[in-house]
C-alpha cells in the first residue's frame, strides 16, 4: 500500500513538472493542436484525434477503417482534414453542419474515442495547464464547446494551396509534368471528373451516388442514414482531391487501395458493381480511357499534393 501511495504521488509530481515546463499556447489554433494530439481525450488514454487523422498522410488514416479505443473498427473510411475549412456539411453522410460540431462526434462515439461530455469536461478542469490555457485564450474555464472551437481552429489552419498544380496555374509551366498536363485536360473533358471535382478544393461539396450501393453486399445507404429521404439512398459526400495521393485507401468503404484502382472504377463502374441502385447518370456509360490516359489522370491527381505534405 505504501508503495502504491508513493507511486501515485510520483505520478502527480511528474504531471505538475510537465505542466510547469509547457508554455501556454499563443493562439486558439495552437491550443487546438495540443488537444488534437491529447490522448487523454480517449476513454483508455491511448488514442487521440491524430491516431486516425495522421499528419503525414494529409490527416487521413492508412487503413480502410480506423481502430477505436477498444480496438473496434469504424464503419467508414477516415477522410483527410486538409482544406476543409470552408466545406460543409461534414462526414460522408453530411450529418454534421460544421467543424465545431464534427469535433465532438468521434470524441463521444462509443467505438472511436469512448468519452462523454462530462468526462471531457472533468479531464480538462483537473489539469492545471489546460485551465490556464483556456483562461488565456477564452477567458473562461475549459468546457466541451470551447474544446470544439479550439480543435476546429487548428483544423482550419491545415489548409494548403501550394501544390505543384497551383504553381502551374500561376504561370510556372515547369511545375508539373507533361503527363500531368495531359491528365488535367482529360480531367476536364473525356474523364468527366470536373463535373464533381472542381477548384479550389476539387469537389462540388455535394452528395452523389457513384454506384457503390447495391442493397446487398455494398449496403451502406449513405446520406439516407442522415436524412431518411429515399432520394439520398446510396449518395455520399464528394471528397476533395487535394492531397489525394496521400489519402489511400479510397471511397467511403476504403475498397480501393490506389489511385490507379479508382481510375479503373470510374472508367467502367458497371464492371465493379453491375447491380448498383440509383447510380448517377454521369456514370451511365464507360469512359473508354486508354492505359496511357489512365496513367496521365493519376499523374495529374498526384500534382495536387501540397508542398508541406510531399514526401522527402
Image (tube, rainbow, N blue to C red):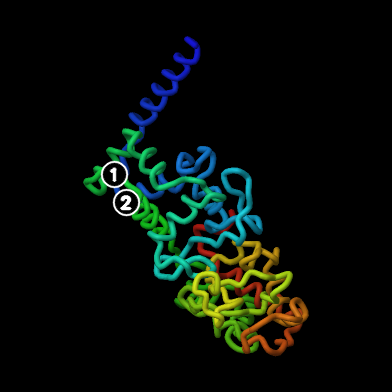
Residue picked out by circle 2:
146
Query: Quadrant of the rendered structure where residue 141 is?
Result: top left
Residue at the image position 70 percent from the left and 80 percent from the top: 276
Q: In the rendered view of the protein, which quadrant contains the C terminus?
A: bottom right
Q: Is residue 56 left or right of residue 99?
A: right
On the image, the x and y values in percent for residue 108 come to 47, 50
- Quickly name the residue at label 1: 134
| Residue 65 placement, left or right of 163 | right
Q: Name the one closer to the observer, 155 or 309.
A: 155
Which residue is drawn at the image coordinates 65% and 62% (left, top)? 249
**Residue pushed farthest left?**
139
Q: On the image, which quarter does residue 252 sit in?
A: bottom right
Q: Which mark is residue 296?
A: none
Gap between marks 2 and 1 measured at Cα: 8 Å
Residue 175 in view of the camera: no
Q: Nearer the viewer, mark 2 or mark 1?
A: 2
Give coordinates of residue 305: x percent, y percent.
55, 65
Whether 1 is drawn above or below 298: the answer is above
Can you say whether 98 is above or below 48 in the image? below
* x and y percentages locating residue 211 in the rendered image: 67, 79
User: What residue is at 33 percent from the left and 53 percent from the top?
Assistant: 145
Report whether residue 230 is seen. Answer: yes
* SS label for mark 2: helix
Q: Residue furthest top?
A: 2
Residue visible at 35% across and 47% down in the picture: 31
Amino acid at each position: 500500500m505504501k508503495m502504491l501511495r508513493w507511486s501515485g504521488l510520483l505520478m502527480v509530481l511528474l504531471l505538475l513538472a510537465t505542466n510547469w515546463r509547457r508554455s501556454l499556447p499563443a493562439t486558439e489554433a495552437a491550443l487546438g493542436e495540443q488537444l488534437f494530439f491529447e490522448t487523454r481525450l480517449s476513454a483508455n488514454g491511448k488514442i487521440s484525434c491524430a491516431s486516425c487523422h495522421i499528419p503525414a498522410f494529409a490527416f487521413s488514416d492508412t487503413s480502410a477503417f480506423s481502430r477505436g479505443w477498444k480496438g473496434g473498427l469504424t464503419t467508414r473510411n477516415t477522410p483527410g482534414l486538409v482544406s476543409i475549412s470552408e466545406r460543409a456539411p461534414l462526414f460522408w453522410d453530411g450529418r454534421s453542419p460544421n467543424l465545431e460540431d464534427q469535433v465532438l462526434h468521434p470524441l463521444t462515439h462509443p467505438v472511436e474515442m469512448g468519452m462523454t461530455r462530462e468526462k471531457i469536461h472533468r479531464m480538462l478542469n483537473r489539469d492545471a495547464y489546460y485551465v490556464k490555457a483556456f483562461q488565456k485564450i477564452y477567458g473562461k474555464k475549459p468546457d466541451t464547446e470551447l474544446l470544439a472551437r479550439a480543435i476546429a481552429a487548428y483544423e482550419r489552419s491545415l489548409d494548403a494551396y501550394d501544390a505543384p498544380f497551383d504553381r502551374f496555374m500561376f504561370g510556372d509551366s515547369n511545375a508539373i509534368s507533361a503527363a500531368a498536363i495531359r491528365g488535367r485536360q482529360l480531367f476536364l473533358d473525356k474523364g468527366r471528373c470536373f463535373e464533381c471535382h472542381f477548384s479550389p478544393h476539387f469537389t462540388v461539396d455535394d452528395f452523389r451516388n457513384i454506384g457503390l450501393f447495391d442493397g446487398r453486399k455494398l449496403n451502406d445507404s449513405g446520406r439516407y442514414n442522415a436524412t431518411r429521404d429515399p432520394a439520398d439512398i446510396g449518395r455520399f459526400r464528394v471528397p476533395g482531391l487535394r492531397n489525394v495521393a496521400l489519402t489511400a485507401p479510397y471511397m467511403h468503404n476504403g475498397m480501393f487501395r490506389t489511385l490507379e484502382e479508382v481510375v479503373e472504377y470510374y472508367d467502367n463502374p458497371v464492371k465493379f458493381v453491375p447491380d448498383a441502385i440509383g447510380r448517377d447518370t454521369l456514370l451511365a456509360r464507360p469512359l473508354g480511357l486508354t492505359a496511357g490516359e489512365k496513367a496521365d489522370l493519376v499523374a495529374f491527381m498526384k500534382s495536387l499534393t501540397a508542398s508541406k505534405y510531399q514526401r522527402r
